[in-house]
Amino acid sequence: MAGLVAGIRVSGVPAGWQVRGGRIVLAVALSLAGPAVAQNSKEAARAIAGEPATTPQRLTLVDLPKPAGRKVALFDGRTLKDWQPWLGYADPALTYRNPPDKPVGTSRDTSGDFAVRTVDGTPAIWVRGETWGSLVHRADLRDYHLRLRFKWGAKTYAPRETQPRNNGLLYHTHGTPGEVFGTWQPSAEFEIMTGSTGMIVAVGPKLRGHTDVGFDPSLIAPHLRYRAGGRTIDIVNGTPTWNVEAATDAERPVGEWNTIDLYVVGDRAVHVVNGVPVAEVRDLATIAADGRRQPLTHGRIQLQSEGAETWFREITVEPIRTLPRIVVGR
């Protein structure tokens, strides 16, 4: 079970924290235990994000980058050419339990899990969602603007049958298939989940990234929401900073199409949902065997399968040299 080491204030900075760039950054190493958090998660969140609780911000995206090259379609509208499937455990309920079972991987025909089908009169990538896993695109991407459209299908599956529909766009993907919980590759995640689309998630124990947060007691653990100008944290899987909720819920109702934009330059990224900026992350990195932080500046993308039928279409990337900025409206 992950936990937070109690801090003793020394010259105004709690033990286990560092001051960087005028902000307090969580630096204590915590045990890794998947998405689990301590029972005192709200107390941990208060210590991490500070008081008072965050309030809504009106965020705007400015200084949109000009394309630095031609736009490329990652989905040809006919086939899954260049997409590689991977499936986790036959029973997804085993995913976070470190079971002795082997994941399905590529050992079976995946046409019943991922396919190209027509929906609303247009071809799209269909993700069944029953068996967890992902479609991984073969391209190694860096410095790009990715845009795609998605909508939820009608079906959901155990063990998430009654939970919010869940999927994700994983980027800066590296490592080996199934390295994370037998199901995904290490990545940063642009969460796609009803009520939380745009959330930042660290996929894998060695993934790191800095972002700014506020404490939001209305959220489930870890109770952290993206807040421009908030306290800087390091996102670490299996700790009280394993994910950061989107600034706002900008998703459309289930059954309607949504547009997400992911802007990535080097080790920084901006998450946008239906034109609304909802999060940014910087200093993306992996932790080397000697403990050093190594910048993560490129990688592949994954479209997740995680318990909900999902449709994806119009998936494009174009090169960029600068990131847009998120500004707080008055």
Image (cartoon, rainbow, N blue to C red):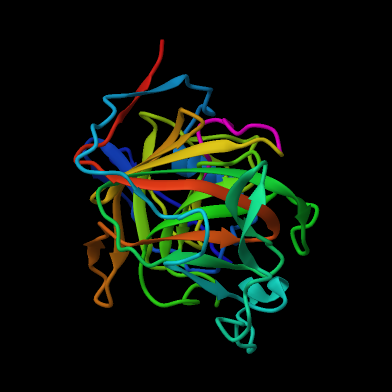
Instruction: From the top left corner, tell me how far across and down residue 67 is, in percent.
Output: 24, 37
Outermost residue to the top: 330
Q: Which residues are magenta?
A: 244-254
Q: Position of residue 259 (x, y in %)?
A: 51, 37
Q: Is residue 9 visible?
A: no
Give residue 321's position: percent from left, percent from top. Answer: 19, 41
- Say whether residue 246 is magenta: yes
Residue 137 horizontal/vertical position (percent): 42, 64
Left or right: residue 237 versus residue 221 is left
Image quadrant containing the N terminus: bottom right
In the rendered view, does 288 fall on the left or right side of 46?
Answer: left
- Seen in the picture, residue 94 relative to 267 is either above or below; the reply is below
Residue at left 32%, top 62%?
299
**In the foreground, 57 or 71:** 71
- Nearest the viewer among 182 and 35 is 182
Which of the 4 image quarters holds residue 176? bottom left
**Magenta stretch: helix, strand or loop mostly:** loop
Q: Name the residue at 79% across, 57% down.
A: 161
**206 horizontally vs 194: left or right:** left
Question: Is any part of residue 286 visible from this angle?
Answer: yes
Q: Is residue 268 above or below residue 182?
A: above
Is 285 placed above or below 65 here? Answer: below
